[in-house]
Image: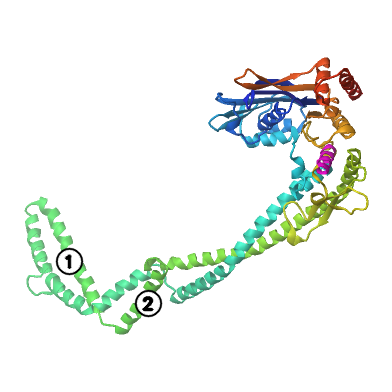
Amino acid sequence: MLRLIKVKNYAVIDEVEVNLQSGLSVMTGETGAGKSILVDALGLALGNRADASTVRPGAERAEISVIFEFSIDHPAMLWLIDHGLDNDETCLLRRVIYSEGRSRAFINNTPATRQDLRTLGTLLVNIHGQTAHQALLQGTAQKEILDDHGNTNLLAKEVAKNFSSWQSLNAELNVENKNKGDRQLKLELLNFQIEELETLSLKEGEVESLETERNRLAHVDRLSNSLNKILEDIYERDEASAHQLISAAHRSLDSLSELDFSLSEPLEQLNQIEIQIRDTAIELLRYRDDLEPDPHRLEWIETRLSKARELATRNKIESKNLFNLLDHLKNKIEKLKNASDSLQTLSKSVEQAKDLYIQTATQLTKIRTDNASSLSKAVTSQIVELGLPHGRFRAVVKEKTIEQADATGLDSVEFQVVLNPGQNFGPLSKVASGGELSRISLALEVVSAGTLGVSTLVFDEVDAGIGGGVAEIVGRRLSDIANKRQVLCVTHLPQVASQGLNHFYIHKLTDGKTTRTNVRILESKERVDELSRMLGGVEITDTTRAHAEEMIQRGSH
C-alpha cells in the first residue's frame, strides 16, 4: 500500500507531503490547480522518463519520494530481497531530477536504475491515465488486457521467450545454411590438398636431405677438383704434405721428450693431430671416390623439391614444415564435417524450439478464448450500468497461421461492441464514439482492476465525459474495488468524490509573483463545501449543501 507521496520543487509544487490510507482516496480541485501533477510525480518515482523542464523555476532540482508498505510475501518484497534491497516491510522510492537534465533514482536509499524503478513499480501500482482509452484501440493493448483478466501474463511471457528462442535459432540456421556452400568448396579444396600431400609423401627432414643431395649432384666437378687439391695438400703429396710434416715433427719431438719429460704433453697433441689428419684424409678420400654425376637422380630431386616449394608457397609455410601440414589439413576437414553434423543438430534444435513455441502458444490461445468469454460478460454488465443499456461487448480471439506467428502468440485479439439495437458487432475502434469509448475504457479498467496483482490503483480523471447517475455508478465501482485494494482517484465528478473515504483538496496559492500548488485533506465540513462547489452554481445555496451532505452520507454506506 502507498503510504506517502512527498514532492519538492516539481512543476508548481514547492513542497507537498500527502499521507495516504487504505480504501478509496479522492483528489479534487479547481481546473488548472494541478490535480494530475501528483499522479505525474508518482509516475516519476515509479520510473517514468524525467524532463528537466518540470523542475520548479529557480530550483536546482526536483525530488519525489514515495513510501510503500507491504507484507513479506508480496511480489515486490520478493523482488527487493532478490536484489538485496529489502528493508523490513517498507520500501522507499526516490527520484531526483536536476535542472540541467540528468536524474538519479534510489530504492531504499541505494542508487538504482530507472529500469529498476519501472520493474518494481509494476509490482506496486497500476496507473489508469486520461488517455488510456486511446491505447485501448490498439490490438496489442487489447491482448494485454485479456491476459491481465485471465492471469495469463506468465504464460504469455513464456510464449514470447519461446518465440525469441525459435527465431534466434532459426536465424542461426539460416546463416549456417548460407555457409554450407562455402564449407563444401573448402572441403573439396582440402581434399585436393591432402591428395597432393599424400602423393608427395614427404617425411620429416626429407626436404633438408634432398636439398643437400641436390647441391652435391649439381656441383660434382667442383667438389671433385677441390677435394683433389685438398687431399694433395694434407695427405697425398709425396713431399711436404701436412701429414708428412706433422709426422716428421712428431718423430723429432718424441726423441726430445726423452730428454725432458715435460714435452710429453705437446708430443701427445702432435700425435692426435697426425691421427686426425689421417682420419680426415680417409673420410675425404671416401667422399671423393663416391662422387659421380647422376643427371637422372638430380632431375628427380629437382622435381620433388619444386613440388614441395609449390605446395609450401600455396599454404604459406616453409618447405621443411610440409610434413606437418597433412595432419593440420585433416583436422580442418574434421571440423568442417563436425560443422555439417552441427548443422543437422541445429536443424533439430530449430524444430524442437518451434514445436515448443507452438505448444505453449496453442495452450495460450485456448486459455485466452476461455477468458474472452468471461471478460465479455463482465464488461457487458459494466457498460450497461455505465449508461449504455443496449451495449454488448465481446473479445474475439482469432487463430493465426504459423507463418503469422509472433511473440504474442498464434492469435489476434479484437474488442468488438454493439451499442444500439439492430446493429452488428463491429471493431471498437470503428463503432464507438469518443464518449462511448471513454465509458467502455472505464468499464474495462474497472473489470481488469479487480484481477490485477498490484495493491494500489490510481485513476487519473478516467471519468471524463461521464455525469449524472452514471457518474455515481462509477464512484460505487471504484469504492467496490477499494474494498480489496487501495484506490486513488483524481476526479472532477462530485458523484465519484462523495464515495471516497479520504478526500484531498488540491488548490493553488499565489502572492502575485509566484504560484504554488498545495494539497490538504478535507474534514467533514470542508468536504461538504468542496462537493457543493463541484455540484456547480455561482452561489452555493443551502439546497446545494444539503445535496452534498446527502451524497456523502449515501457514499458512506
Please state which amino acid type lies under the numbered disc 2: Arg
Q: Quadrant of the C terminus?
A: top right
Q: Tell me which label, 1 or 2, sits earlier in the chain.
A: 1
The stretch of residues the image draws in magenta is 435-446
Spot the residue most to the front.
538
**Residue 404 higher or lower than 129, as above or below:** below
**Can you give x and y, in whole percent of width and height, for residue 552 in the image?**
88, 22
| Location of mark 2 (residue) | 304
Give the secondary structure at mark 2. helix
| Location of mark 1 (residue) | 277
The one of 244 and 338 positioned closer to us in this rendering? 338
437 magenta-colored: yes
Residue shown at 31% from the left, 72% from the top: 211
Please state which amino acid type lies under the numbered disc 1: Ile
Is residue 296 left or right of 362 when viewed as pictured? left
Quadrant of the rendered structure where residue 545 is?
A: top right
Gap in Å between the C-alphas at discs 1 and 2?
38 Å
**Residue 81 higher or lower than 414, as above or below:** above
**Residue 518 higher or lower than 440, as above or below:** above
Which of labels 1 and 2 is toward the front?
Answer: 2
Is residue 217 left or right of 277 when viewed as pictured? right
**Can you give x and y, in whole percent of width and height, for residue 515 in the image?**
63, 22
